[in-house]
Amino acid sequence: MREGSFRFAVVQSVLLAAVAVAVALTYHLPLRDPDGVSVPTYIRLPVILLITFLTDVVPRAVHRAGSVRAVPSTFVAVVRERWPRDHVRFALVGLGAWYLTYVAFRNLKSYVPFVNGRLWDDTLARIDRALWFGHNPAAVLHDVLGTGVSAHVLSFFYVAWIVLVPASLVVALVWSRNVRAGEWFVTAVAVDWVLGVATYFLVPTLGPVYADPRTFAGLPTTWVSGLQETMIAERFDVLVDPFDSPAVQTIAAFASLHVGICVTTCLMAVLLGMRRWIQALLWAFLAVTVVATVYLGWHYFADTIGGAVIGAAGVLIAAWGTGNHVRGVPRLSRPEVEEPQTVRAEPR
C-alpha cells in the first residue's frame, strides 16, 4: 500500500456516502450540508485550509528569516520544504476522505428517527441503575459535585471536545510529517463515525436530558443547556418536515462518540509513543469528558462504555486498514520521518 494513500479511508467514505444516498432515496429524505446553516462548506473549508497552511509556514518563515527583508524569500523556501507535491496530495486526500465520511455520518444520524422509531431510553436507564447499584448516575454526580460551578466547568470541557477533533486533524494532516501515523489517526476517527452511526440505528435513544428532564432541571443555564434546547427544536422541525428545515437532526445518545473519539486519541498517543505529559493530559481529558457527558445529561453511563469500545475498535480497524500492525497487533509500521533540514534565507 502506498504510504499515506488513505486508500482504506477513501473507500470507507465512498461506501458510507453511498449508504446515505440510498437511505435518502428509500425514505424520501433530503441530503444536507450539516454545517451549511452557519457557513457554507465551499467557504468554510478553503478558509480552514488557508489558516492551517499559514499556521504551519508563517511561524517557521519568521523564525528562520533573521530579518524582515528576508521573510518573503524564506517563506517561499519553507513552503517548498514543508509542502512538496506528495504532502499536498496527502493532506487534501485525507481531508477529503474525512469530510465525506463526516457529511455522510451527519446525514445518516439525521435519518435515524425515520428509519427506526423505537427508543431504548428506558432500557438504558435500567442498565445504568444496575451498574450504579440502584442509583441514577447523573443524580449521584449532581449530589457529589453540586449543581453550581461544576455545571459551568463541565460544560466548558464538554464544548472543548468540539475543538479537539479539528485541532487533532490539523496536527495529523498539516503540522506532522509522519504520514503513516497521520493516516492511521484520521482513518481511526472516520471508523469511529461509521461504527457510531451503526449503533444509532440499532439502539436509537434521545439521552437522559430529553427522556428524564426533571433530573437536570436544577442545573444552571450554560452554553450546553442552550445547545440542548436548540438541538431538540431542530429535531422537531426535521421530524415535522425534513425538506422545509435546513437543519439536520443531531440527537442520538448510544453510543457516545465524545467518549469514543477521546479513547481513540488516547490510544493513538500511547501507540505512537507521544510524550508522557501529553498522554496524561489526554487521559485526564477523557475522564472529565465521561463525567461531563453523564452529569449534563447527554448520555447514559452505558453510552460511555459503548463509546469506549467503539474508540478502541476504531484504532484496531484503522491499524488493519492502513497496514499499521504486526500480525494483527496495532503498531506503527514505519519510523517517524525526520524533519527536513532547516532553511535559512541568505542575507542580502
Image: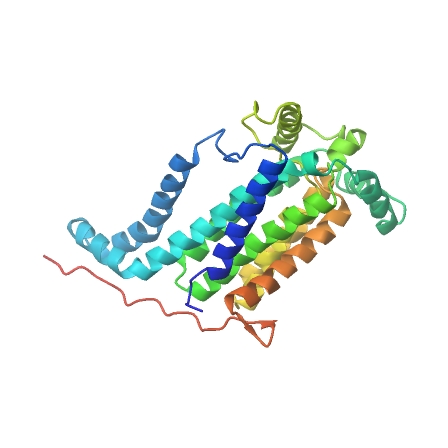
Q: Which quarter of the figure has residue 123?
A: top right
The percent coordinates of residue 91 (x first, y second) are 39, 54
**Who's the residue at 69% across and 44% down the image?**
200
The percent coordinates of residue 288 (x first, y second) are 66, 48
**Who's the residue at 27% across and 61% down the image?**
81
The C terminus - image quarter: bottom left
**Horizontal relation, residue 251 to residue 184: left or right:** right
The percent coordinates of residue 300 (x first, y second) are 76, 44
- Disc tally is 0
Q: Which quarter of the figure has residue 29?
A: top right
The percent coordinates of residue 248 (x first, y second) are 58, 32
In this view, which residue lies farthest toward the right? 134
Q: Which quarter of the figure has residue 321?
A: bottom right
In this view, which residue lies farthest toward the left? 348
**Who's the residue at 58% across and 46% down the image?**
19
The N terminus - image quarter: bottom left
**Front position in the image: 285 or 340:** 340
**Front position in the image: 57 or 95:** 95
Colour scheme in use: rainbow
**Front position in the image: 48 or 99:** 99
In this view, which residue lies farthest toward the front? 26
**Horizontal relation, residue 34 to residue 117: left or right:** left
**Front position in the image: 194 or 258:** 194
Residue 174 visible in the shown view: no
Q: Is residue 346 above or below residue 159?
A: below
Residue 135 visible in the shown view: yes
